[in-house]
């Protein structure tokens, strides 16, 4: 069962590995990221950050979509983490069972502006439009760094 899809530019770190995984009772984390599948050092670092009682799977965006739609991951309480809004929208648009997209940390970069509700979340205008399209089709989009924060809307 897909518990949550989170966007976090850091992918797997303490906040994600422990706070969110525990809150969701997740027993499997899927890192959906094209670059991580090609970078041995990054994969090793991600594996070191995972909780001991949780399985970690690292797949490309396309492989993740195929696996999620095939049902192979249905046996897990699955927490999906992606690095970008673009990747989150790709997954949410192609996997019907993704009902909520949680936006965590998105670092400032050229062309982004901090969200008024949280300075750790920075969007481009295109990313805001992509997320609003997701919302218009019924996907819940929330801004929340940690589980005990109150959920904010775009």
Image (tube, rainbow, N blue to C red):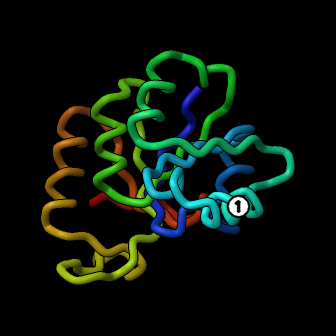
Residue 45 location (% of width, % of height): 69, 66
Quarter that holds the N terminus: top right
Residue 94 location (% of width, % of height): 31, 29
Q: Nearer the viewer, residue 17 or 44?
A: 44
Secondary structure, mark 1, is helix
Instruction: Report the residue at 23% width, 80% height from top.
Output: 113
Residue 129 visible at all = yes
Indicate left or right for 58 with 21 as reference: left
**Numbered disc total:** 1
Indicate left or right for 100 with 12 as reference: left
List the single residue furthest toward the right: 52
Residue for badge 1:
44
Residue 148 visible at all = no
Query: Within the image, what quadrant is residue 125 found in?
Result: bottom left
Residue 15 location (% of width, % of height): 65, 66
Q: Nearer the viewer, residue 17 or 47?
A: 47
Query: Within the image, what quadrant is residue 50 found in?
Result: bottom right
Quarter that holds the C terminus: bottom left
On screen, 24 above or below 99?
Answer: below
Residue 84 location (% of width, % of height): 36, 59
Instruction: Report the residue at 60% width, 64% height from top.
Output: 42
Instruction: Report the residue at 44% width, 20% height from top.
Output: 69
Indicate left or right for 146 with 116 as reference: right
Instruction: Report the residue at 86% width, 51% height from top.
Output: 52
- Disc 1 crowd, CA 10 A, few/some/many (<14, 14-19, 20+): few
On screen, 106 above or below 97?
Answer: below
């Amino acid at each position: 069962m897909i518990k949550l899809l989170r966007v976090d530019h850091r992918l797997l770190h303490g906040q994600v590995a422990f706070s969110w995984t525990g809150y969701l009772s997740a027993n499997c984390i899927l890192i959906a990221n094209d670059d991580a599948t090609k970078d041995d050092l990054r994969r090793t670092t991600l594996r070191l950050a995972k909780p001991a009682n949780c399985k970690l799977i690292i797949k490309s965006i396309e492989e993740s979509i195929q696996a999620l739609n095939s049902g192979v991951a249905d046996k897990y309480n699955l927490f999906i983490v992606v690095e970008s809004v673009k990747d989150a929208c790709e997954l949410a648009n192609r996997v019907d069972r993704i009902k909520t997209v949680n936006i965590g940390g998105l670092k400032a970069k050229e062309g982004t502006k901090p969200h008024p509700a949280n300075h750790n979340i920075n969007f481009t205008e295109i990313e805001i439009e992509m997320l609003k399209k997701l919302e218009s089709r019924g996907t819940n989009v929330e801004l929340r760094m940690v589980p005990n924060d109150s959920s904010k809307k775009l």
